[in-house]
Every structure is written in structure tokens, then in C-alpha cells.
Image (tube, rainbow, N blue to C red):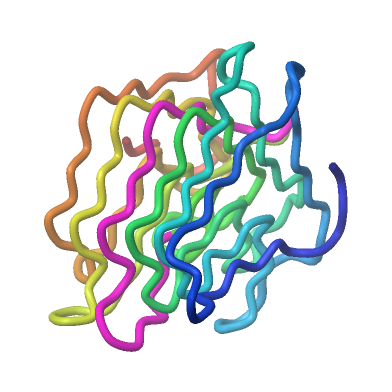
Amino acid sequence: MKGTNTAQLNQVAGVTSVRIEPAGCGPRTITGTGTAGSTAPVIYPVIYLNGADNVTIDGLNANGNSLTISNTTISAVPNTCTIAFQNDATNNTITNCSVLGSSTSAVGTAGGNIWFGALATVTGNDNNTISNCNIGPAGGNLPSKAIYFSGTSNALANDNIVINNNNIYDFFSPAVSSSGIDLTTFGVSNLTITNKRFYQTLTRTQTTESFIHV
């Protein structure tokens, strides 16, 4: 499936959970080529968990890891991302997927393949899991950040996030600092990062005094 619009999942009264997985026996790709992100709260991910709770996106079917979610937009504009968690999106799981992107925003700027955001109303984006995923570039266009955390301190922080058993690769920009997982100094608590693999598939060359962070 290819399009220019965001799949926005909002919290709906009476709906207790949603499960999304590929049908059939072949691989499936959800690709977005929409407008780059802009000043919050307007953002343009491929999948926007906008206060949605208890959503599971599982790419595993009979042929293995076969769901790709990709944003091919190349942009340094803040908030450009592939999957966004905002407005108290809680108890969600992204697993067994390839999450690809080409956001080129610098470290410390909102955006990346997966973005846990700072828009919170009561609790923050809590109890979310990213597991068994391949997180890397959309085609040959490398993202500067794979996962980015922003947030609000104290009660509205993004709490109890689990990042487990993911391949995080080919995050790089020659002109700005890049990061596999970019954490702000506040707004995240009880973050668990386990069984991670950070790597580059080719030699990278910086053209400025920037850094590659993991």
C-alpha cells in the first residue's frame, strides 16, 4: 500500500484493543510519501498513534518478518517521522516489523523513524514496546536518527518504554550529528533498552565536526 496520507489511530470509546498484521503469505509494505513534518502539533508520520491505547502492530506471519512501514520523505524539517506516539498513547506494541525512514533532522530535533513525542495530556506515552524490528533507511536515503524521545518532565513523562531485540542500522548524516537512539535530558523515565544491535553496513565519512551517537 502506498499513499500520501497519514494513518491516524485515535482513542475511540468502547474499543479496548486493535491488532494490525499482514494478511496472506507474502510480504506487505505500507509506504508514505507525504509532506514533511511541521511545527507541532501538526505532524506527518505514516502511522500516528494519537492517544491510541492497546494497539499491536505485528509483522509476523507464515513467512516471518514481513511487514514494512516506510516513510520515504527526505527532510530535515522537525517532526518528520515514520511512526509517532503522542497525546498519551499507551500500552502499544510495534513488533516484528521493518520501520524505515529518511528524516535528516539533527540530534536533539524531533523526528526520526520512531518518535515518542512531548504532546501529553494526563500521563505521557507510557508502557509502549518496540521489539524484534529492523529500524533503518528507506532505500538509500539514510535517517539521521532511528528512535527519538522527547517529552515533558514529571507526571507527563514517557514512562516504562521497552526497546528490545532490534536491529538499528545505517543512521547517519555527513553534516549533522546522528544517533541510533536519541534521548532528551528530560521527559523519559524507566526506559529499558536490551539486546540491541547498532551497526553501519558501509563506511561513513563525516564532512563536519559532528558525531555518531548510539
Residue 113 is situated, as x and y percent measured from the top left of the image, at 55, 47
Quarter holding the N terminus is: top right
Residue 29 is situated, as x and y percent measured from the top left of the image, at 75, 34
In the rendered view, would you say 4 is above or below 61? below
Residue 98 is situated, as x and y percent measured from the top left of the image, at 58, 30
Kindly identify the residue that appears in the image at 73 percent across and 22 percent down: 27
Kindly identify the residue that appears in the image at 40 percent across and 68 percent down: 89
Displayed quadrant of residue 159: bottom left
Residue 195 is situated, as x and y percent measured from the top left of the image, at 24, 23
Residue 181 or 160: which is nearer the viewer? 160
Displayed quadrant of residue 139: top right
Residue 10 or 191: which is nearer the viewer? 10
Q: Name the chief secondary structure element in magenta.
A: loop
Left or right of 160, for residue 132: right
Q: Is residue 117 magenta?
A: yes
Kindly identify the residue that appears in the image at 43 percent across and 23 percent down: 167
In the rendered view, would you say 106 is above or below 135? below
Q: Which residues are magenta?
A: 116-140
Quarter holding the C terminus is: top left
Displayed quadrant of residue 150: bottom left
In the rendered view, would you say 129 is above or below 184? above
Kindly identify the residue that appears in the image at 41 percent across and 46 percent down: 93
